[in-house]
Amino acid sequence: MRIQTDFLVLGSGIAGLTFAIKAARAHTNRKILVLTKTVEGESNTRYAQGGVAAVWDHEKDTFGKHVEDTLDAGDGLCRRDIVEIVVEEGPERVQELIDWGARFDKEKNSDNYDLAREGGHSEHRILHYKDLTGWEMQRSLMEEAKRYPNIEVLEHYFALDIITQHHLGRMVIRVTPDIECYGCYALNKQNGEIDTLLSRVTVVCTGGTGQVYKSTTNPVIATGDGIAMTYRAKGRVENMEFVQFHPTSLYNPAGENPSFLVSEAVRGFGGILKTAEGGEFMHHYDERLSLAPRDIVARAIDSEMKKRGTDCMYLDCRHLDKEGFMAHFPTIYEKCLGLGIDPMKDMIPVVPACHYMCGGILVDEHGRSSIHRMYAAGECSSTGLHGANRLASNSLLEAMVFAHRIFLDTQDKIDHWSFQENVPDWNAEGTTDPKEMVLITQSIKELKEIMSYYVGIVRSNVRLKRALDRLYLLFQETEELYKTTTISPQLMELRNLITIAYLITRSATHRRESRGLHYTTDYPGKLAFEEFSVL
Ligand code: FAD
Ligand code: SIN
């Protein structure tokens, strides 16, 4: 089938739906098609717990403080202009979401929002809805989107490849200056057909990459498809070595995919990291103790676990007010009880897990990628906000700010962009159904092991080299399979994850220093800026 749409949006999380709503409202005569690979409500957004950071209480907090906290966490690699844009435009975007129906918790008997604090924040500035902030944001966005008849959401549609001049038979390489996006090919998972979706403009909002590691807080949809598609289309991708590990996922010896998150807001509420014996250890690592930025806390936990040969460390909440804890963290409380842990009587076992991709599709301050007529927003993009380490709760904020900026940038341009009708349909000649799915499922397992053991929180030249060698084998085997096998979501996810793993590992190999989330025992120090810029 061939489908034409004015705006093609890949992804129905906070970035995709925010953009779709704005475009639909401003262009009532234009069609906005939102693709999502499972159901509309399934996304990383839906699982966000802690909340969204925004300067709200202007008596205590300032834009300047939020900017400095973000720059500090980013360890020298944030773009200050982008940080200022996101921090200063953020509150307006949050207010918009409130106007669309999102609820955030308020202080008792007051109209003031109950602002929480998380690691790396010098003030209380996190708006939240219990420990279900993402669920509430996703809900309100979906409800708002339903009000616009010109938005169509196609569920169970898997975007496969960005269409460019390459598909018209022209040679496209990474330095080709005028690569243009005409839409994408997508697998309709319900009938197995591959459709050609032609658009005037495409906005990639496909979210994170967490599933490249064995243990992650990201749901199974987070396979980095948008970043991998962009890389295949010869678009620019950056900062992939900066993979954020959340310090406190719930340790479950039975294993869970995804790992359940114990929000950083629990530490903001007074939870303290401890050893099994009940001793504190964070003072050995940072004066901000349990509320130091994530890279520092995750490395501290990793180092303590290795030193002690234990599988987890602990978060002690036993001294906290039970009523307050249950009001703020009902989901965490219930989840712990389900595993036989009573947070008011037992310490919560925690372990770091892959959580967030700070790098991604390189975009400018308007969300434009290096491919014309293709934008990117949300976790799949690299705007310059996070630098070498994202400050907690800045991600939802960034997604909203950039979705808005893309909307503004496309507002007039859309009238000048037309459809490229000459795009051929997908050619599936010479492929047959896979005879052994185990070839795909086992490769995904291998990939996750490679990344977890060799390209985790602590890296070294030897481990990175070993990872690259193993990844090359997986790449070769999978490309052979791809040439002869009918397209399936599993096969495409494997291909995409291999690309993501390669990009993370190669970027880590190139960064011959330790900075932010990238720590290597071979180069434990930071390069000075002059040394760094000649690499
Ligand atoms: P997502 O919300 O992940 O949406 C991606 C969409 O793309 C999905 O609809 C998916 O189906 C679709 N998609 C992907 N690939 C394809 C494809 N090939 N074809 C079609 N569709 C596709 N951040 C904060 O700021 N505050 C928090 O408190 C917070 N807590 C978090 C807690 C958890 C457990 C997790 C996992 C993350 C948390 N984050 C938090 C991070 C934040 O939730 C995400 O970075 C953010 O929601 C990403 O939004 P997004 O719109 O970019 O992508
Ligand atoms: C959390 O609640 O700890 C997650 C916050 C985030 O990832 O920004």
Image (spheres, rainbow, N blue to C red):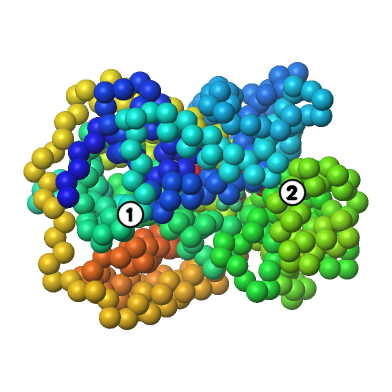
Q: Position of residue 441 (x, y in %)?
A: 41, 75
Camera-side mark, 2 or 1:
2
Disc with the residue nearer the chain's start (2 vs 1):
1
Q: Residues within 10 Å of mark 2 (few under 14, many from 20)?
A: some
Residue 287's place in the image compared with 160, above or below, is above
* Beta carbon of the mark 1 residue lies under 8 A of ligand 1: yes
Kind of residue indicated by mark 2: Pro
* CA separation in Å, label 2 and label 1: 34 Å
Report whether 307 appears left or right of 150: right
Could you tell me if the residues under marks 2 and 1 are in contact, i.e. CB atoms within 8 Å?
Answer: no
Report whether 309 appears left or right of 18: right
Q: Which residue is mark 2?
A: 330
* Mark sitting on residue 158: 1
Residue 314's place in the image compared with 293, above or below, is below
Residue 85 showing in the rendered view = yes
Task: Please identify the quarter of the rendering in which residue 497 is found.
Answer: bottom left
- Residue in the picture at 48% in, 50% down: 42
- Residue in the picture at 61% in, 62% down: 259
Residue 301 showing in the rendered view = no
Q: Residues within 10 Å of mark 1 (few under 14, many from 20)?
A: many
Label 1, secondary structure: give it: strand
Report whether 38 appears left or right of 235: right
Q: Position of residue 45 (x, y in %)?
A: 53, 45
Report whether 488 appears left or right of 298: left
Task: Please identify the quarter of the rendering in which residue 31 is found.
Answer: top left
Q: Position of residue 505 (x, y in %)?
A: 45, 62
